[in-house]
Amino acid sequence: MESTAERLRKEGRKEGMAKGITLTLKSLLEQRFSEELPEDIKQSMEKADREDLIKIRDNIFDIEDVEDVRELLK
C-alpha cells in the first residue's frame, strides 16, 4: 500500500513535469511566432492537462499560428 508521502511525491513530480512541459512549449511557440503568446493561450496552457500538452508537442512543427494552438487546447 502506498503511503501518503509517496502519493504526494508522485503528485508533485507530475505537476513539476507538466510545468516543465508547459514552459518549454511556451518558449518554443514564442520563438516560432517571433512574439509573445497571447495571455489567453498562456493561461489555457497552464490549466491544460498532460494529454493536451502532448498534442501541442506532437504537432509543434505543424502549428502555423496561435489559432492552431487554440484548437489543440479545446
Image (cartoon, rainbow, N blue to C red):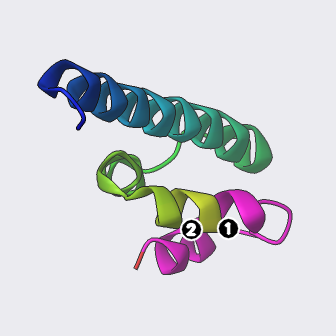
Query: In this rendering, which labeled residue sits more in front, label 1 or label 2?
Result: 2
Which residue is depicted at the point 57% across and 38% down? 21
Tell me where residue 25 appears, x and y as whole percent: 62, 43
Q: Which residue is depicted at the point 53% across and 29% down?
A: 20
- Residue 57 among magenta residues: yes
What label does residue 65 carry, if any?
Answer: 1
Q: Determine the residue located farthest toward the left in the rendered image.
A: 4
- Of the residues shown, which amino acid type is indicated by label 2? Val
Residue sticking out furthest to the front = 1
The kind of residue on which mark 1 rests is Asp
Determine crowd level at label 2: few under 14, some 14-19, many 20+ residues with C-alpha closer than 10 A.
some
- Quarter of the image for residue 67 reads bottom right
What quarter of the picture does the N terminus occupy? Answer: top left
The numbered mark at residue 69 is 2
Q: Are the residues tagged 1 and 2 within 8 Å (C-beta)?
A: yes
> Which quadrant holds residue 72?
bottom right
Q: In screen coordinates, is 24 left or right of 22?
A: right
Residue drawn at 24 percent across, 34 percent down: 2
Does 54 sit above or below residue 32? Answer: below
Q: Considering depth in this image, is 72 or 53 the residue closer to the camera?
A: 53
Residues drawn in magenta: 56-73
x, y percentage for residue 60? 77, 60
Q: Nearer the viewer, residue 25 or 65?
A: 25
Instruction: Name the one closer to the observer, 67 or 51.
Output: 51
- Outermost residue to the right: 61
How far apart, in angstroms, are the residues tagged by discs 1 and 2? 7 Å
Q: Residue at x 61, y 75 (%)?
A: 68
